[in-house]
Image (spheres, coloured by chain):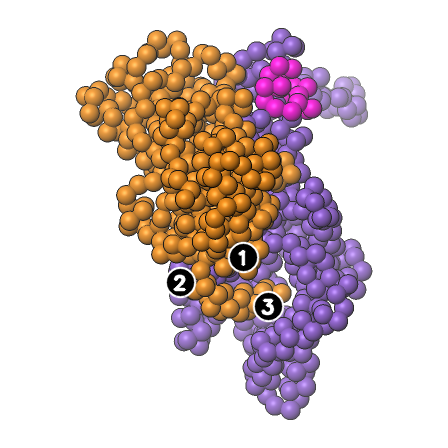
């Protein structure tokens, strides 16, 4: 069996090599499934439930793209990736897109030859301390012991922050988020630092969340977004405009509740263009006319995705903050659908 | 004179030993309280053990089996008046996720249009028990069961991955063709030529005929097959056991061949074996897994999807084989030279001598080392979590990523440790049984 599978795999490899040149969009359509890279588990962003169905904010992005391209939000093969395997998985073509809370940085975009299609969550590194410490600002943390995940950008940001403020700290290196929670709760470190969304999720899991405060300072910019391989611009456009459609839908007031009604035609030409009742935007992308409608119906618009997975009604209870629409003082600003 | 005697003439009746040196009290005096220092140590360790057990049992005894989330566990314990970080375990997570920890993402009937297929891995592992019986307990089961053992390597992949039944049958047919070819050819030509030709015959069958014929037969009889299941659905203990069984099952024969190759007089064979063993042993398993997961992808044409679990099988098997080869070489080195000379003097050829004289003794000597390697390989399967496969340890991360269970650590790791302990302890006890059974020194 092994041998035949091996040989079979080699044959498939040969065939697939020929097909790969056709472009990711055609590959996905031919396969009938989108291979979407996600994390192996991050609260609110991607996690399998007891039956193995993936749920979360990043997962919603994958499902929206699958719905736009294939018409079926369930036509996704979720490929769990770790921080170490994510980029090779994308570069080698094992996955078609990566939606795995990955920070958009210069070197990842330019040197690693990826294309970030946009930003679906503006995050930043923050600090959490026990309330009894009586600290109200990160600048008062001189001499504190800090639990920090090794080998991450958070580690470097922390060093930069303390150096530029001329204060000292003692790092307690930990490997995983679960370990740092245990260390922090047992008092092995005074301060716990990671992305603000992670801090909120961690704090929500504590027995007495009110005994811990998240300090106001955000010491880094962590724009998280989906990314695709360099050089396949048609596919990049599909993912980029799916994300833009979700954001614009919120701005235009298109929700999963009223989309069927709006999809029949409205007085607003931009909604009509987006939902495919006017113009040929879908055709330009190589998709069907109602691609954006399907993408929005998969899990709702950006705001709905946010509220169901990480919003204030969930245990994680993140406020929109920077992730509000530009009309509400946030940074979300989708280019026009024209 | 007088009959006064100073020598006792009759025997005194035997008396029972003093009460303080027999029974439980005597045992305690002898073993636990035989001196001041030992008494102090006994008391101190006793207190320590009782305190630890009290703590652990108090924590584990927690009526939270039906809780739906960590907060619900806390509410239940709060109602019982138990507070704090160590108030009690939250067993609801095990109740909610034990099936996932055992089967990973194997179809469980909740997905629309996909049946519950978990009977397949269960059947595969039950059959594994039967297939191993003739090997492990040769004298206690009917000899005919060895046919099941021979068929098992083809049944297991079919059950786990599904697909048409003709695939595994055609692969098995290759072995039959090779065997028949060897029998026929060895009467016409020398045994070495027959061996080489029959291997070529079998490989040719696999390469050029097996796939096509299996495909044709599968089209003719589509009913004779199981629903295919992708490797990505494998997870939890099922993944660990599958990797462990494949690596253990293949590494022993490969290890024996490598060990013999290393002792061979043929220069090329010897240097190939030494090079392979030293290279693999010089590299950490985690590196090999990264090569399997990332580097192979870069070398292969873009868009290639060479099954990740198959890559892991190959790497773990190679790794285990190199260690196995050295363990068996140890057994070979421990055999006195007289055994080899005795085999020669009986006129046995190389393979006969190995099969009848050398290997039975060398393997017997190596049993503890072989079983340690097996146990090590089984535990090393958890390393696949670094390349994103959902072994039980990586699943704990995924489970914690559910906001219901975020923050649960000990319950999950305790459950996993318990299951690993059962398997590893079982293997270890079996090796001790085997050593006793094969003991020939009659002490």
Residue at image location 55% in from the left, 17% down from the top: B86
Q: Which mark is residue A29?
A: 1
Chain letter for mark 2:
B
Give the answer, above or below, for where A24 lies relative to B182: above
> What residue did someone put label 3 on?
A4
Residue at image location 58% in from the left, 32% down from the top: A258
Shown in orange, the chain is A
For the residue carrying disc 2, how many other residues have a C-alpha within 10 Å: few (<14), some (14-19), or many (20+)? few
Give the answer, above or below, for where B279 lies relative to B45: below
Q: In which quadrant of the rendered image does the N terminus of chain A lie? A: bottom right
Chain letter for mark 3:
A
Q: Mark 1, mark 3: which one is toward the viewer?
A: 1
Q: Colour of chain B?
A: purple
Is residue B73 part of the magenta span, yes or no?
yes
Specify whether A144 is left or right of B253. left
> What residue did someone put label 2 on?
B299
């Amino acid at each position: 069996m092994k041998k035949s599978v091996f040989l079979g795999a080699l044959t498939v490899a040969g065939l697939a090599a020929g097909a790969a040149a056709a472009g990711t969009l055609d590959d996905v359509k031919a396969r009938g499934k989108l291979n979407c890279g996600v994390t192996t588990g991050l609260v609110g962003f991607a996690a399998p439930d007891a039956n193995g169905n993936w749920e979360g904010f990043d997962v919603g992005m994958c499902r929206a793209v699958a719905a736009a391209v294939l018409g079926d939000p369930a036509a996704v093969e979720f490929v769990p990736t770790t921080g170490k395997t994510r980029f090779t998985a994308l570069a080698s073509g094992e996955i078609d897109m990566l939606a795995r809370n990955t920070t958009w940085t210069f070197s990842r975009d330019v040197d690693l030859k990826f294309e970030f299609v946009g930003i679906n969550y503006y995050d930043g590194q923050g600090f959490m301390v026990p309330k009894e410490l009586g600290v109200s600002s990160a600048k008062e943390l001189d001499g504190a012991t800090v639990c920090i995940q090794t080998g991450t950008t958070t580690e470097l940001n922390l060093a930069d922050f303390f150096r530029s403020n001329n204060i000292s700290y003692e790092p307690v290196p930990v490997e995983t988020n679960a370990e740092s929670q245990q260390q922090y709760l047992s008092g092995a470190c005074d301060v716990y630092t990671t992305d603000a969304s992670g801090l909120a999720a961690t704090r929500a899991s504590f027995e007495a969340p009110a005994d811990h405060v998240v300090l106001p300072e955000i010491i880094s910019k962590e724009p998280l977004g989906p990314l695709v391989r360099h050089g396949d611009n048609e596919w990049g456009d599909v993912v980029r405009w799916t994300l833009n459609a979700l954001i614009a839908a919120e701005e235009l007031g298109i929700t999963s509740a009223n989309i069927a009604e709006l999809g029949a035609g409205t007085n607003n030409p931009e909604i009509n263009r987006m939902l495919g009742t006017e113009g040929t935007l879908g055709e330009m992308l190589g998709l069907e006319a109602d691609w954006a409608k399907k993408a929005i119906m998969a899990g709702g618009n950006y705001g709905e995705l946010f509220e169901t997975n990480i919003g204030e009604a969930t245990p994680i209870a993140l406020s929109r903050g920077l992730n509000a629409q530009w009309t509400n003082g946030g940074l979300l600003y989708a280019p026009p659908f024209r | 004179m007088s009959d006064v005697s100073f020598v006792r003439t009759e025997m005194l009746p035997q008396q029972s030993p003093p009460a303080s040196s027999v029974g439980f009290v005597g045992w305690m005096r002898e073993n636990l309280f035989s001196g001041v220092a030992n008494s102090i140590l006994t008391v101190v360790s006793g207190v320590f053990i009782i305190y630890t057990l009290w703590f652990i049992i108090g924590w584990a005894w927690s009526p939270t089996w039906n809780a739906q989330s960590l907060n619900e566990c806390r509410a239940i314990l709060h109602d019982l008046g138990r507070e704090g970080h160590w108030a009690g375990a939250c067993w609801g997570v095990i109740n909610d996720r034990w099936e996932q920890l055992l089967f990973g993402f194997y179809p469980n009937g909740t997905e629309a249009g996909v049946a519950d297929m978990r009977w397949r891995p269960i059947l595969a592992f039950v059959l594994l028990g039967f297939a191993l019986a003739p090997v492990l307990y040769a004298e206690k089961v009917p000899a005919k069961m060895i046919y099941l053992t021979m068929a098992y390597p083809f049944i297991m992949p079919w059950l786990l991955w599904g697909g048409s039944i003709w695939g595994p049958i055609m692969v098995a047919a290759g072995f039959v063709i090779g065997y028949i070819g060897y029998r026929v050819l060895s009467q016409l030509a020398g045994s070495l030529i027959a061996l080489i030709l029959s291997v070529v015959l079998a490989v040719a069958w696999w390469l050029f005929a097996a796939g096509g014929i299996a495909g044709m037969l599968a089209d003719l009889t589509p009913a004779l097959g199981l629903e295919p299941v992708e490797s990505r659905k494998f997870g939890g203990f099922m993944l660990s056991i599958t990797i462990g069984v494949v690596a253990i099952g293949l590494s022993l024969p490969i290890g024996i061949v490598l060990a013999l190759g290393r002792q061979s007089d043929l220069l090329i064979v010897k240097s190939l074996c030494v090079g392979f063993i030293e290279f693999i042993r010089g590299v950490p398993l985690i590196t090999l897994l990264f090569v399997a997961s990332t580097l192979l992808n870069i070398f292969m044409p873009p868009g290639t999807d060479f099954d990740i679990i198959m890559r892991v099988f190959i790497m773990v098997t190679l790794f285990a084989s190199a260690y196995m080869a050295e363990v068996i070489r140890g057994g070979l080195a421990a055999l006195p030279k007289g055994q080899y000379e005795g085999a020669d003097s009986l006129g046995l050829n190389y393979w006969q001598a190995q099969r009848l004289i050398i290997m039975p003794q060398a393997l017997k000597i190596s049993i503890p080392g072989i079983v340690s390697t097996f146990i090590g390989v089984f535990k090393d399967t958890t390393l696949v979590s670094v390349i994103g496969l959902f072994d039980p340890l990586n699943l704990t991360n995924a489970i914690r990523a559910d906001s219901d269970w975020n923050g649960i650590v000990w319950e999950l790791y305790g459950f996993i440790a318990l299951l690993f302990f059962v398997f590893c302890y079982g293997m270890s006890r079996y090796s001790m049984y085997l050593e006793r059974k094969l003991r020939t020194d009659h002490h």
